[in-house]
Image: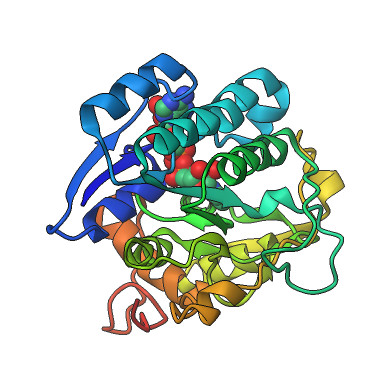
Amino acid sequence: MRVLVTGAKGMLANALLPCLGSEHEVVGVDLNDFDISQETAVQKAFRDLRPDFVYHLAAYTDVDGCEANPRLADEVNTQGTRNLARSCAEIGAILLYVSTDYVFDGSSDRPYREDDLTNPLSVYGQSKLGGEKHVQSLLKRYFIVRSSWLYGPRGKNFVSTIMKVAAERDELRVVSDQRGSPTYTRHLALKLADMLRIEAYGTYHATGSGDCSWFEFAQAIVELAGLERVRVVPISTQESGRRAPRPAYSVLENRRLIENHLDSLPHWKDGLAHYLKEGQRLGEFKLPLSGRGEGPLRAEVRGL
Ligand SMILES: NC(=O)c1ccc[n+]([C@@H]2O[C@H](COP(=O)([O-])OP(=O)(O)OC[C@H]3O[C@@H](n4cnc5c(N)ncnc54)[C@H](OP(=O)(O)O)[C@@H]3O)[C@@H](O)[C@H]2O)c1
């Protein structure tokens, strides 16, 4: 199969590309190859590459940046996705579009299901939902995969930010009134790679198992990293002063993954333990030595 991956230099693509087997002809493209918001450039790329399956990972992902620049958010996330969906329709390619928990407003009192009502609070969420709608209306053979709170190598993410800040400060103030499911990019990538082999098209939720607040996530990071001197202090969303509104609760039920025998993703703490080792190996951050002769992490990696 000829497989095209957009956003190939991004954090999730970095995890996905090595998971796509050598039996496939895989091409990764990014903004320096063509801009997805330019339809003629997308059409030309599809004429040249003629993919059978497209992983659409490219996006304007700066949530607060989107709030300040709604036009760019629309051009890249909504119109860019429409351009890719149109080109897929023209050549009969399957499209897998990665979307977000921020399409929900956070008012639910139980994990969101794939067919629950969307109501994004932010420009980013609106622009990603706009992309979903184009995919649904233009294609029959598509996957929309909503994930949340991604972290992993080669990208700016919450874990690497906490590790950097914790190296300089003894106290971290972290929002405690937003709840979601952190997702390790490698765990999600393995699931996305499995989707190449199935034909049960439609919308999926795919997130790390378990849930937490950003505050609890930060506490787990400093604890697993052995940063005993760092105190994590809970603050409210209002105190954080972020530009874009975010859902207070965006836990996603991964119901369709289970129904289609793809299994749920490992727990977010397993992913965290793995990433703390991987990030250290890649020089993204340094961990203090535990002195217990077990390596620098206090917790064992429980596997992928
Ligand atoms: N990160 C999260 O927490 C999260 C959560 C849920 C869903 N998602 C979704 O998951 C997907 C992957 O996220 P990620 O965190 O891996 O994103 P990322 O690291 O920000 O990567 C996105 C990539 O898209 C490229 N890009 C931006 N604008 C483009 C354009 N106009 N044309 C072509 N390429 C363009 C970027 O290039 P430049 O770097 O050169 O701009 C970047 O390489 C996205 O669709 C995102 O919406 C992310």
**Residue at figure coordinates x 76%, y 63% from the top left:** 116
| Above or below: residue 58 compared with residue 254 | above
Q: In percent of the image, x 55 and y 59: which residue is there?
A: 202
Judge left or right: residue 52 versus residue 74.
Answer: left
Looking at the image, residue 19 sits to the left or right of residue 254; the answer is: left
| Drawn side of residue 190 relative to residue 120, left or right | left
Q: Nearer the viewer, residue 127 or 163?
A: 127
**Could you tell me which residue is drawn at 55 percent across and 66 percent down?**
207
Q: Where in the figure is residue 21, as x and y percent of width and height?
A: 18, 60
Instruction: Please state the horizontal and vertical placement of residue 108, each as a whole percent of the image.
Output: 84, 66
The image quarter in which residue 301 lies: bottom left
Quadrant in which the C terminus appears: bottom left
Q: Position of residue 252 (x, y in %)?
A: 66, 67
- Considering only vertical position in the picture, is 297 above or below 121? below
Image coordinates for residue 14, horizontal then vertical, percent: 31, 48
Residue extending furthest toward the left: 22
